[in-house]
Amino acid sequence: MEEGRLSFEGWRLVFRSANLALEIPLTRLKISWDEARDGAICFTDPTQPSWSIFTLDQDILKHRALQEQAHTRNQISELQAPRELSRRLVLIVAVVAGFALLVGMVSVLTGIMTRSLVAGIPARWESQLGDELAADMKAEVSVIESPKLNARLTNAVTPLLQAIPKTALQYKFYIVKDFRPNAFALPGGHVFVTSALLETNHPPEEIVGAVAHELAHVQLRHGFRKIISTAGPYLVFRIFVGSSSGLFSLLGANSEVLVSQSYSQDYELEADAAGWDYLVKARIDPRGLISLLKKFEAEQNQVKSFRPAVQALSSHPSTAKRIRILETKWNKLKDKSGFMKFKDDSSG
């Protein structure tokens, strides 16, 4: 192994050391990578197979003598193509990762600002908006008065209302004539329960399970969070650093979202978890929510093309996933006994 100096003299690559001088015409020069030598550049001459010249200086490939010769220039292009592709892929991955990180940070900050804004909404303002939305809803659906169904509803939800977190809201319940068992809640504590859910084929545990889920939406202010978060990070930031009037204007202008559209999967799962906790705290068997969801799922499979007139009363998405999550919560529940027994109200 000889150490020396590389140079270009005319159209020749010249290597000189203290004991050796080697010349390779550029027309015979072969260029390759030697990964065994940390990716060194290897120069060889087929007519002198016993000699190889190595260098770690990548800049030598930019030398004018090598670039002006088509023979060597083409070899350099072929050598650099895979490495250039790899370099670009690494750059692309880095850019994508950086962008994903930025998006993630923006998402987290937007979520923090959204929750802060929602927490600052006065209960009185929420109640006023809820009253207006409830009036619109009652004009769209058929609210009925039925002592029998009202008794079933009251019997089911009374213990639940004593266990949910206390707020300034006063919950109001309405029975809606509809053949699908379901419930829907508006900000301000207005809860609409369908007549089908209150029929005797649905035990009180299923009724209160549906109501617990909807009360969780109200307690967690999912409707307001949805409006604010969908406004976009820039607008959320402007509202966050501005006055409360901007927030109320945004919520008021998009209040139809609270009635006309369902919640995202994340909100549904969050409401399931909170509703489950309300039921357990009230010592109500939370499996009523699971059995009701299973009935929803069976109906969805039978009537996939059904579209209700009121979107707010449509069944929620990802029912199978929700059932799996709640069944896991039941399996992990330590105390599975001591749940209250509802009185038999089926003959009322």
Image: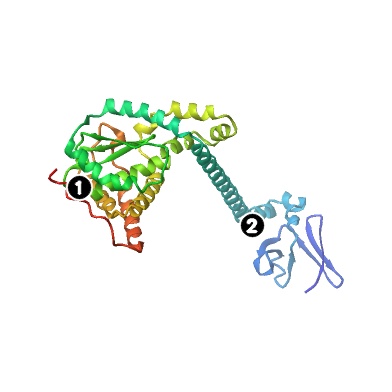
Local packing at callout 1 (Cα closer than 10 Å; few below 14, some 14-19, many 20+) is: some
- Quadrant of the drawing holding the C terminus: top left
Q: Position of residue 198 (x, y in %)?
A: 20, 42
Q: How is the image coloured?
A: rainbow
Location of residue 12 with respect to 319 vertically, above or below: below
49, 324: nearer the viewer: 324
Q: Residue furthest left?
A: 347
Residue 344 got which mark?
A: none
Residue 79 circle label:
2
For the point 26% across and 52% down, the residue is 288
Q: Is residue 61 visible?
A: yes
Estimate the x, y position of residue 160 in percent, counting from the top left: 32, 47
Q: Quadrant of residue 8?
A: bottom right
Neighbour tally class for label 2: few under 14, some 14-19, many 20 plus, Cα within 10 Å: some
Give the numbered dot on residue 202.
Answer: 1
Position of residue 54 relative to residue 206, above or below, is: below
